[in-house]
Image (cartoon, coloured by chain):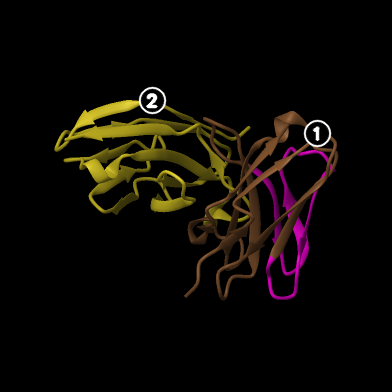
Amino acid sequence: ETGVTQSPTHLIKTRGQQVTLRCSSQSGHNTVSWYQQALGQGPQFIFQYYREEENGRGNFPPRFSGLQFPNYSSELNVNALELDDSALYLCASSLGGEGYGYTFGSGTRLTVV
Amino acid sequence: GNSVTQMEGPVTLSEEAFLTINCTYTATGYPSLFWYVQYPGEGLQLLLKATKADDKGSNKGFEATYRKETTSFHLEKGSVQVSDSAVYFCALSPTPGGYNKLIFGAGTRLAVHP
C-alpha cells in the first residue's frame, strides 16, 4: 500500500504571495488532516477534511483554506503569506477520524522571505 | 483546555542506557494518548498508543502506561540503540477513539551515542 505523498518537498515564497500545498492520501483513507510544525515545536492542527467537507478546524485564520477531492487527495492553500507561516506542513490521512490510524507524510518545508 | 507537556531535550544517552521521556497532559474527558517519532527529514510515525486508563502501549521495546491519576504517559525503553536517535512527540486526542485532531507536545530530541 502506498503511503502519504506531499508535494513539493521544499518551497520558498515572498511575503504577501499565495501558496498551494498538495497531499495524496494513503490508499483506502478518506480523511485528511493538515498540521503546521514550526521549527523546534510540535505540530499544530490546522483542519481536517472528511469526504470532501471540512469537519474540524484549529486556531488558524481564514487565509488558511483547504480542499479535498473525490479521490481523497487534498490541498492546503495559504493566502497573504506572512513570515511566521514559515514551517513544515504535514499532511496525515486516516480512515475516518481515528487518531491512532493516522499516516503522516514527510511534509512540505515552506520558507517565507 | 487540552495540552501536552514534555520534558525538554536534548536527551543524550549512551547505547544500552535506560530511557525515560516524561509526558503529562491536561484534558477534559477521557483522551487517547500517543507517542510519535520523527526521524530526520521524515514525517511522524506512530510509535505506540493507549486509549484508556491503565492501558500500556508498547512497540519496538518502547513502553508507556496511561496514568489517569497522575495525568501522565511517560515513554520508557530499557536499552536504547543509536538508531533510536530521533525526536519524540507525546500527543493526545481529546475524544475517545481519536476523532478529529491530535494535540502534540513540543517534542524531545534523543541522541544516542555508541
Which chain can be seen in yellow?
A: B
Residue in view at x 69 percent, y 59 percent: A22
Which residue, given by chain and number where applicable, does mark 1 sit on? Answer: A15
Q: Colour of chain A?
A: brown
Q: Taking the image as drawn, is residue B69 in sight?
A: yes
Residue B88 x %, y %: 40, 39
Q: Is residue A58 left or right of residue B28?
A: right
Residue B8 x %, y %: 41, 24
Which of A24 and B89 lies nearest the eye of the viewer? A24
**Residue type at the position of mark 2:** Gly
Q: Which chain does the residue under circle 1 lie in?
A: A
Q: Is residue B34 left or right of residue B99?
A: left
**Residue type at the position of mark 1:** Arg
In what quadrant of the picture does the C terminus of chain A appear? top right
Question: Which residues, given as a range, are shown in magenta?
Answer: A45-73
Residue B9 x %, y %: 38, 25
Which residue, given by chain and number where applicable, does mark 2 sit on? Answer: B9
Q: Is residue B42 left or right of residue A72?
A: left
